[in-house]
Image (cartoon, grey):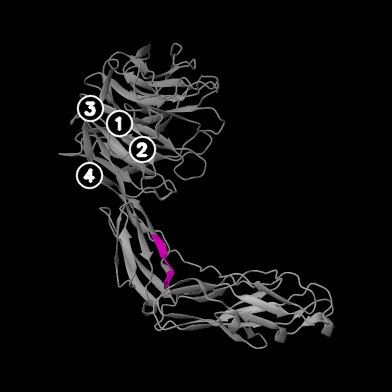
Amino acid sequence: MRRGAVQAVLVLLMAAMLPLAVVRTAQAATVSFATHVDTATGTNPYAVVVGDFRGSGRKDLAVINYGSSTVSVLLGNGNGTFATKVDYTTGTNPTAAAVSDLRGIGRKDLVITNYGSNTVSVLLGSGTGTFATKVDYTVGTNPESVAVGDFNGDGKPDLAVGNHGSNTVSVLLGSGTGTFAAKVDYTTGSFPQSVATADFNGDSKLDLAVANHGDATVSILLGSGTGTFAAKVDYTVGAGPFSVAVADLRGVGKLDLAVANENANTVSVLLGSGTGTFAAKVDYTVGTRPNSVAIGDLSADGKLDLAVANYASGASGTTSVLLGNGDGTFAAKTDITTGLGPDWVSTGDFNADGLLDFATANWTAGTVSVVLATQSPTITSANNTSFTVGVAGTFTVTTTGSPAPSLTETGTLPTGVTFTDNGNGTATLAGTPTSSATVGTYSLTITAHSTATPDATQPFTLTVLAGALAITVPGSASLGTVAPGNTLSAHLGAVQVNDNRFTTPANWTAKVSATSFTTGGQTASETIATTAVSYWSGGFVTQSGNGTFTAGQLTSLNAVVLSAQRTAFSHTLGSGSNFVSWNPTLVIAVPSAAVAGTYTGTITHSVA
């Protein structure tokens, strides 16, 4: 039974529905990699770096072409594809590059080492994806790599260049306008091939790590914070170290090293102490002639992994991926196919799906390979919902995964409810259960599918609840003023019955009752008894649905005394939902003996 009570100054009691708790189910997602997509570059691409050259939030590529002495810029489309290259002239035989905002104006610039001309080329970016003509600065002999950092603490980017032919690293202090002072050289090990910069001893001053191809060492040069560096300290790595990368592989706030060893077919991991020293190397097997190592969370598990480009990896190029355990150790390699002769690997989220992808510069093939990470689907929305008969309901199924999975449903849906795949990794369960016959529990299975395996499945429960039979009344009504011995007649306001039970037949009866009207101390002269209170419903104001609606008292001639509960309105026969409203009239005969005052009483409507 449903009730609504009105006072004349009437009181309406409202009921509140409590929210339904839902449970989310968790599923494991697997990250893998799609087939590489290759794009033409210049001749003998040696390195590839990633940057946002337009300030668009999309990742772009710059590929260093040793054989054609150019840099190819490929602007990203934001979906993992790239525009055709645009070439810019560099020095002779460029070997490496770094991306940085050299002027502090929010535009990315390029710094490129030129092995054949013993220079670094600076190409200032326009911020629209184009670059100015190079400006060259002299460095040591056969420069192979460059790192950018603020070495003297003046807020302006400086350069460190590893010179393969002169066994030095050249430091060029920046002006903050994109120009640089003359080099100052520091001794390294034999044939320095790669340089990286970071704060290894926690003094907020940048230091240098240099991989020395000729003597199987990595040199650490601690920075003074004024642009100068202490003498090198060497640590043994594998044979022919070709690339060094820096990261906190353990998540302990101490920086570690990963070194790709070309002649040993390994990557050496050296854990840092946080004071500028490093533990003995631990080696992991990779492919043949590893020439580059990059660090990133390739598996999307919060632990850093390694990607190693293997230059001489057979008929097709490969990049070895070694998943990190989060403690500085790594699982055995998994090889991902790339273009032929990959010489360099860099990471970036090329399709904005939150997963880390990678690109390789392929010396032999003359291409850059883009390898997109894929993630098996996971259903992230709740595994249950409820709809009500006669009431439109909707529920959105959500997922994660890349590419966005398609969604299907198996199992019987209630009449009036559909399941629609939205084509964007979501689906919509929506509709209006159409009859009481649909009340119950529906066991469904939702499947998310994409090219990344495995599929995700979720047992899902849809509960259809019986529709409600409800009555609503005004919150209060002021009936007016009358002298003792007279009769007062006034409307109460709209009373409504909503029947969404979808029963057949859709029968219900609305009842009305009243309390006495009282004032003051509720003595006899301060009370108007229910025998003096009459009610008539009048006809409907609005109605919908089939069946027969019957007013309890169609006119004033049919008014009833509310000394007992009376019928106000009723509905018989029909099916489906129905609705009716009426505006009843209350008639109060005020006794002659009634004292002056404000009288209140309660008129209660109920339906069943």
x and y percentages locating residue 600 in the rendered image = 74, 75
Pick the residue in front: 511 or 468.
511
Q: Marks 1 and 4: in contact by CB < 8 Å?
A: no
- Reading the image, the residue beneath label 2 is 348
x and y percentages locating residue 100 in the rendered image = 42, 25
Pick the residue in front: 308 or 35.
35
What's the residue type where badge 3 is placed? Thr
Mark 2 / mark 4, whichever is N-terminal: 4
Mark 1 / mark 3, whichever is N-terminal: 3
Residue 341, quarter of picture? top left
Q: Is residue 392 left or right of residue 68?
A: right
> How far, Cα to Cα, is label 4 from label 1?
30 Å
> How far, Cα to Cα, is label 1 from label 2?
27 Å
Q: Which mark is residue 41?
A: 3
Q: Marks 3 and 1: in contact by CB < 8 Å?
A: no
- Reading the image, the residue beneath label 1 is 240
- Reading the image, the residue beneath label 4 is 35
Q: Marks 2 and 3: in contact by CB < 8 Å?
A: no
Residue drawn at point x = 34 percent, y = 30 percent: 49
Mark 3 / mark 2, whichever is N-terminal: 3
Q: Which residues are magenta?
A: 386-396
